Every structure is written in structure tokens, then in C-alpha cells.
Image (tube, rainbow, N blue to C red):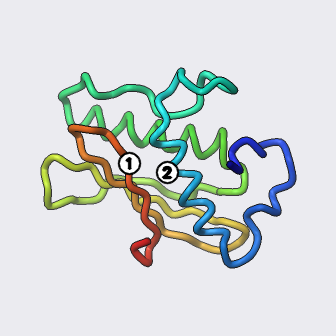
């Protein structure tokens, strides 16, 4: 997993597979529960399942996504991140604009508020 290459060569993100690798790494980080990674207790997303205030959850999710990108994906430059409307009230959708090796990428993070399992999609839907 490239996240573990944090201090190494970032050439892992070069080439046409770079977006796919970033999406996979984001998926891995966001679906990891904070405090359970043997290599770093801050890796992953804090447990927010006990909160019921949607606005608080959205703000916390944005903070967690931002923190994890900055800490564990140094080849990704986060330009903008915000909630977007989701037709299902039990889901949260976050959109982020990032730069990966000079390429602008739009990424969506979607979670079901019941399971808090994350799906990560690029602007092409995959």
C-alpha cells in the first residue's frame, strides 16, 4: 500500500494509473478505524457513529478526510472539499478537488450513515 511509502519516492503516483492508485489509497484510509493501525494510531477515520447531528457529522467527516489526505497522501494536493446534496437522507456525499501529479481530479466520497463504510469515486464514476 502506497500509504506506507509516505517517506519514500512518490513515483508510485506517476503514469496513467495514478488516479486509480489515489482512489484506492483514499478508500483504504477512509475505511480504516482510527487507533487500530499498528504503524500509526492516527491513521484512519475517528468513530463518528454515535453522533446524531448531521451538520456535526459532515463537518467532522470533512476534517477527517482533510487530515488523512494531508498526513498519508503527500502526492495529493487538496484544493477544495465540501458537502454536496445527496437525494438519500441517510447518505453523506463529500466532493473534493485535488491535484495529483499536476492533474486536476474531482473525487466523491459517499458514506451510508448507518455503516460509515466509504465509497470513493472519481469524476468518471469509478
Query: In the rendered view, would you say 30 is above or below 125?
Result: above
| Residues under numbered marks 1 and 2 in contact, where contact means CB atoms less than 8 Å apart | yes
* x, y percent for residue 44: 52, 34
Which label is found at residue 118?
A: 1
Circle 2 residue:
27
Locate the C terminus by quadrant.
Answer: bottom left
* x, y percent for residue 39: 69, 26
In the image, is 125 to the left or to the right of 102?
left
Q: Residue furthest right?
A: 9
Which label is found at residue 28?
A: none
Query: In the rendered view, would you say 42 is above or below 63?
Result: above
Q: Nearer the viewer, residue 107 or 13?
A: 13
Secondary structure under the numbered disc 1 in the rendered image = strand
Secondary structure under the numbered disc 2 in the rendered image = helix
In the image, is 49 to the left or to the right of 63?
left
Q: Residue at x 53, y 21 (%)?
A: 35
Q: Nearer the viewer, residue 22 or 95?
A: 22
Query: In the rendered view, would you say 68 is above or below 36?
Result: below
Q: Residues within 10 Å of mark 1 (few under 14, many from 20)?
A: many
Q: Which circle's residue, 1 or 2, is located before the other in the chain?
A: 2
* x, y percent for residue 27: 49, 51
Q: Hey, which quadrant is residue 58 in on the image?
A: top left
Marks 1 and 2, how far apart at CA? 7 Å
Q: Hey, which quadrant is residue 56 in on the image?
A: top left
Q: Residue at x 77, y 61 (%)?
A: 12
Q: Residues within 10 Å of mark 2 (few under 14, many from 20)?
A: some
* x, y percent for residue 87: 14, 61
Q: Nearer the viewer, residue 52 or 59?
A: 52
Amino acid at each position: 500500500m502506497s500509504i506506507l511509502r509516505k517517506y519514500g519516492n512518490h513515483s508510485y503516483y506517476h503514469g496513467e494509473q495514478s488516479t486509480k492508485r489515489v482512489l484506492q489509497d483514499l478508500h483504504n484510509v477512509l475505511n480504516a478505524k482510527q487507533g487500530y493501525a499498528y504503524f500509526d494510531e492516527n491513521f484512519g477515520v475517528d468513530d463518528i457513529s454515535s453522533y446524531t447531528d448531521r451538520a456535526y457529522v459532515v463537518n467532522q467527516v470533512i476534517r477527517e478526510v482533510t487530515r488523512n489526505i494531508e498526513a498519508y497522501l503527500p502526492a495529493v494536493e487538496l484544493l477544495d472539499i465540501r458537502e454536496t446534496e445527496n437525494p438519500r437522507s441517510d447518505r453523506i456525499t463529500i466532493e473534493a478537488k485535488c491535484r495529483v501529479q499536476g492533474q486536476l481530479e474531482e473525487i466523491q466520497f459517499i458514506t451510508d450513515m448507518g455503516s460509515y463504510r466509504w465509497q470513493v469515486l472519481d469524476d468518471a464514476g469509478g
